[in-house]
Amino acid sequence: MYNKITVAIYYMLIFKLPNSRYLRISNKIRLWYLKNILKVFNCSTDCIFEEGVYISTGKDKVSIGHHTHINENVFIQAAKIGNYVLIAPNVSLLSNSHISVQIDLPINLQGMTSSNPVIVEDNVWIGRNVVVMPGCVIGTGSIVGAGAIVTKNIPPFSIAVGVPAKVIKNRK
């Protein structure tokens, strides 16, 4: 019950605080709440967590590391996000999807797949409007270009772009 109340408070109040560009205290309040109440952050004061970030239920499904910058309107179903990560606006990190095996039954009645969290390793930059599908791992030091849809793992130190995302360069 406590978890449901704390998550409800997040979505009713903390979620809607203005962008830190306009009111710096907003970021401090969000960080304090996420770290001390919802316990999804293991962050320092260098983290930035903007408004409108959906974090699922807040418990055991989302983990966010140090020096991470998450911009506005990011959707995180379940994920383990490393340290020094940059996530641009409107990114979606998905952990499940709809089952669509039976053609004689409406998709919305077939249920959901089990949770398969996204893993974003350290020092990753995810560009604007990227969608990361369930279970994908984005390797250390990688960059995912704006608008990409990640459907499979991205190796460490790669640059991936496109729909579906393809590795176009190794950063080493």
Image (cartoon, rainbow, N blue to C red):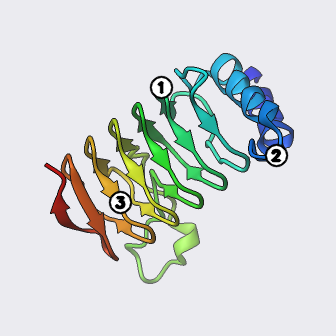
Say what secondary structure mark 2 lies in. Answer: loop
Amino acid residing under circle 1: His
Q: Position of residue 138 (x, y in %)?
A: 30, 49
Amino acid residing under circle 3: Val
Q: CA distance from mark 3 to mark 1?
A: 20 Å
Image point (21%, 48%), residue name: 157
Closer to the chain start, of discs 2 and 1, is 2
Amino acid residing under circle 2: Tyr
Residue 144: which numbered mark, if any?
3
Say what secondary structure mark 3 lies in. Answer: strand
Image point (54%, 40%), residue name: 69
Question: Which numbered disc, 2 or 1, marks the residue closer to the eye?
Answer: 2
Q: Would you call the spot at circle 1 few (<14 residues within 10 Å), some (14-19), or many (20 or more)?
A: some
Q: Is residue 13 left or right of residue 19?
A: right
Pointers 3 and 1 in contact (C-beta within 8 Å): no
Q: Position of residue 129 (x, y in %)?
A: 52, 66
Closer to the chain start, of discs 3 and 1, is 1
Task: Determine the residue located farthest toward the bottom in the rendered image.
Answer: 104
Image point (55%, 48%), residue name: 76
Please give the residue where the numbered disc 1 appears in the rendered image: 66
